[in-house]
Amino acid sequence: MSRVFSGVQPTGNIHIGNYLGALRQFVDLQNDSECIYCIVDMHAITVPQDPKELKKHILDVAALYMAIGVDPKKSIVFVQSDVKQHAELGWILNCNTYMGELSRMTQYKQKKQKSENPSVGLFDYPVLMASDILLYDTDTVPVGNDQKQHIELARDIAIRVNGKYGKTFVVPDGRFMKSGARVMSLDDPTSKMSKSNPNEKSRICLLDEPNKVKKAIMSATTDSEGVIRYSVKEKPGISNLLDIYSAFSGKSVAKLVKEYEGHGYGDFKKDLVEVVNQSLDPIRNRYQEIRQSQELVDSLKEGAEKASEIAEKTIKRVKKNMGLGL
Ligand code: ATP
Ligand code: LTN
């Protein structure tokens, strides 16, 4: 059976970009793969975090995983820092990664600009991500498009280590959605929807109240042409909304364009509000109950034990191949 691994940072509200680009795939993959899903708290601390908030967000994201349909009986779900082998392999991979490679990472370049005094961890972020993936002999990594470069680096590191020390790692592949792989901001459709945008109306979070969803969609930036057609270059706003509509409804963009021929943006947006709220309803309903349950904490502990077992086997193999330890 093929092995799937992915992670989400416990930083604030998960939005529909995270959902359509990554999380949604987690659920489908559970039935025919061995899936491991992680809450990557050590990635979160590459930028400053408030300890109380971080602790809360770890459980928030875990509960969201389960509310969208990740089943801890089928998949391993755990918190990254509970499995110490991630940091251990991280160091070993650091010694097999070049400064030049990390300097070229676009996410680092962008995040560095936002930070007054960027940490070494921010620079090293992609190596820790490669450790997450390679630690579990992962075949497939379901993520949003923005992670392509990081996946490519994980592959390069795996190939490099295998070349130097003999077959040590499985070389992973990214898995990207056809629709929803890159959801753009509602206020500025030329930049990706992001947790860190200060304008709340730029995103729709999975737990937003129906009315908030409505307000965000109705005020989304479009253009003055008033015709519903798809062109990311000429009409990024309406094209983004078409992508979101298509991802949630399963209808193709071409079909939607036909359906809305002769209609204005207002009609289209109103229907989109319905479609999004209908999809988010079951998630919102399940979330609260799961978030309060002891079962949530228990399944994370169990997940960490299972993950550690797999991780330890990999570490032993890596150390043996590299001549580390006694
Ligand atoms: P942000 O930039 O919003 O702060 P992030 O990329 O740091 O978020 P993570 O929680 O680490 O957020 O990402 C979880 C998953 O969501 C990743 O697989 C990422 O590729 C995906 N993702 C994030 N933003 C988008 C987006 N706008 N469209 C599609 N997928 C996205
Ligand atoms: N960098 C990822 C989060 C992440 C991840 C991983 C995703 C950390 N480790 C391992 C897949 C596999 C992001 O989405 N921002």
Image (cartoon, rainbow, N blue to C red):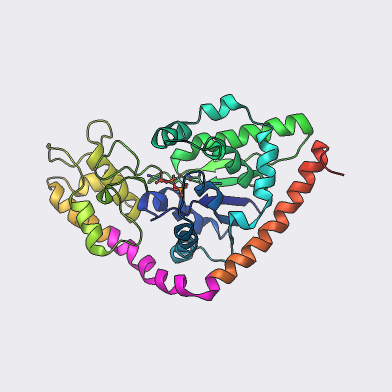
> Farthest residue in the right direction?
326
| Relative height, residue 42 to residue 103 (above, below) | below
Q: Nearer the viewer, residue 120 or 145?
A: 120
Q: Position of residue 258 (x, y in %)?
A: 21, 45
Tell me if 181 is positioned left or right of 59 in this view: left
Q: Is residue 229 magenta?
A: no
Residue 139 visible, this angle: no
Q: Position of residue 157 (x, y in %)?
A: 65, 33
Q: Total number of numbered labels?
A: 0
Q: Main secondary structure of the magenta part?
A: helix
| Relative height, residue 271 to residue 108 (above, below) | below
Tell me if 201 is positioned left or right of 92 in this view: left
> Farthest residue in the top direction?
100
Q: Nearer the viewer, residue 291 or 124?
A: 124
Q: Name the residue rendered at 12%, 36% in the picture.
A: 225
| Image quarter of the C terminus | top right
| Image quarter of the N terminus | bottom right
Q: Position of residue 110 (x, y in %)?
A: 42, 33
Q: Is residue 282 magenta?
A: yes
Q: Name the residue rendered at 74%, 48% in the picture.
A: 314
Residue 226 visible, this angle: yes
Tell me if 229 is positioned left or right of 34 in this view: left
| Relative height, residue 53 to residue 47 (above, below) | below
> Farthest residue in the front direction?
117
Query: Image quarter for residue 302?
Result: bottom right
Q: Name the residue rendered at 81%, 38% in the picture.
A: 321
The residue segment tinted magenta is 276-296
Q: Position of residue 77 (x, y in %)?
A: 57, 61
